[in-house]
């Protein structure tokens, strides 16, 4: 869509950022001064751990409007855990629709 094309894509979204692996990924990106949006269970607790360097978001991978908001301005997605109840089908569809360039699975 043309609206998606007009958005500056400079953010890396880290899914399951409150997991041990997710925390390591977020901290590695922060050290490299990457703009990070972290999907977490508790944004307030995550803010205490990540500080002001990370945009902490509580959201759902299971509904399309939440995914659209979550992916706004996102260039890359790093998956550190669950991809939703449908094993990522909705996530991948939303990434394609929103112009996400890369999806990386880490385990």
Image (cartoon, grey):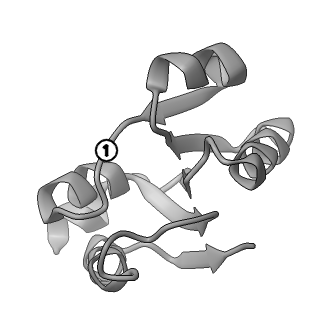
Please report the residue visible at 46 percent of the width from the left and 25 percent of the height from the top. 43
Q: Nearer the viewer, residue 19 or 53?
A: 19
Please determine whether, in this image, residue 64 is positioned above or below residue 40: below
Q: Which residue position holds label 1?
A: 59
The x and y percentages for residue 11 are: 54, 50
Left or right of 67 on screen, residue 21? right
The x and y percentages for residue 83 are: 44, 71
How many numbered badges does the structure rendering display? Answer: 1
Q: Where is residue 84, by image quadrant?
A: bottom left
Q: Nearer the viewer, residue 56 or 83?
A: 83
Please report the residue visible at 46 percent of the width from the left and 28 percent of the height from the top. 42
Please report the residue visible at 28 percent of the width from the left and 52 percent of the height from the top. 60
Left or right of 3 on screen, residue 47? right
Q: Quadrant of the N terminus?
A: bottom left
Q: Nearer the viewer, residue 2 or 45?
A: 45
Please determine whether, in this image, residue 14 is positioned above or below residue 94: above
Please report the residue visible at 23 percent of the width from the left and 64 percent of the height from the top. 62
Left or right of 23 on screen, residue 91? left
Please determine whether, in this image, residue 37 is positioned above or below residue 55: below
Q: Quadrant of the C terminus?
A: bottom right
The x and y percentages for residue 9 are: 46, 57
The x and y percentages for residue 34 are: 70, 44
């Amino acid at each position: 869509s043309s609206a998606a094309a007009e958005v500056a894509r400079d953010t890396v979204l880290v899914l399951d950022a409150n997991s041990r692996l997710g925390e390591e990924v977020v901290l590695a990106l922060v050290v490299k001064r990457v703009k990070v949006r972290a999907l977490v269970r508790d944004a307030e607790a995550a803010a205490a751990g990540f500080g002001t360097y990370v945009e902490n978001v509580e959201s759902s991978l299971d509904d399309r409007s939440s995914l659209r908001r979550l992916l706004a301005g996102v260039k890359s997605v790093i998956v550190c855990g669950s991809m939703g109840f449908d094993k990522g089908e909705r996530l991948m569809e939303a990434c394609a629709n929103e112009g996400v360039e890369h999806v990386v699975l880490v385990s």
